Amino acid sequence: MATLQFLFVLIVLVAISNAAPKKPTLKIPEECKGKGFCAIKPEGYDEMQDLVKKLLDTQFIAQNLGDRIGDDIEIGTTELSPESDWHNCPYRKKRETMYLYNHGNDTKSADYIIQNDLLQQPVDIVSCANDVIETGSDKEQCFQHLGLSSFNLKSQCETSNTLRNYFVLDVISKQIVIKTYEVPCCCSCKISSSI
């Protein structure tokens, strides 16, 4: 009789453990490790969408979102600044759907940026397009038409960053949180002494 009871308890325990919902896991793609923003959708991302939609519906959809898309640049496209403006640092603007933000050398965890039909958060990345300027040309240094060289000043284009907020899923607490990331936002002319 004790054997039957033990067998029954064992079957019940196995059934309960198999009936428990499996926690979706997100795997960081190798290409994303240590690289900041990543446009590759990680394995397990789609399985988290039910939780994300539930949190968005119940937590703050109307009061917190506003317009997070901005102007009409299509996702996945890159724009080059007009050549007439290249004396003031040529730049490239790219809009991407980013799914992850990986901090520095951390290869085991990342922030999972929410992207779905309720909330789209494209990331606009603006960087200097120094490769379009010929070496040795009068446009190699920015704002040379202002006569900077006569004051022994040198100029060069550098990408500048800004801080932007994004909604991310905290996989530990199962909550949506706002995190701030540094995003390349413009190409600026840096002026320095040539001495």
Image: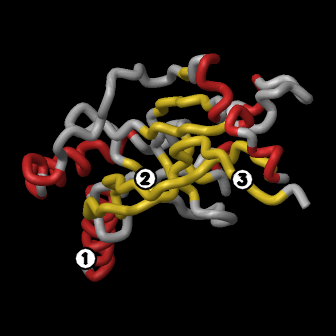
* Residue 80 visible to the viewer: no
**CA distance separating discs 1 and 2:** 46 Å
Q: From what the image shows, is residue 124 above or below residue 61? A: above
Residue type at numbered disc 2: Tyr
**CA distance separating discs 1 and 3:** 83 Å
Quadrant in the picture for the C terminus: bottom right
Dot 3 alpha-carbon crowd within 10 angstroms: few under 14, some 14 to 19, many 20 or more = some
Left or right placement of residue 118 versus residue 99 in this view: left
N-terminal of the two: label 1 or label 2?
A: 1
Quadrant in the picture for the N terminus: bottom left
* Residue 4 visible to the viewer: yes
Name the one closer to the observer, 4 or 41.
41
The location of residue 148, given as percent across then percent down, is: 75, 45
The location of residue 193, given as percent across then percent down, is: 81, 59
N-terminal of the two: label 2 or label 3?
A: 2
Left or right placement of residue 24 versus residue 157 in this view: left
Residue type at numbered disc 1: Gln
Q: From what the image shows, is residue 104 above or below residue 9? A: above
N-terminal of the two: label 1 or label 3?
A: 1
The disc placed on residue 191 is: 3
Give the structural element (helix, strand or loop) at label 1.
Answer: helix
The disc placed on residue 112 is: 2
Name the one closer to the observer, 21 or 46.
46
The residue indicated by pointer 1 is 5
Which tag is nearer the camera, tag 2 or tag 3? 3
Q: Residue at x 55, y 22 (%)?
A: 78
Q: Which residue is drawn at 54% across and 50% down?
A: 27
Give the structural element (helix, strand or loop) at label 2.
Answer: strand
Give the structural element (helix, strand or loop) at label 3.
Answer: strand
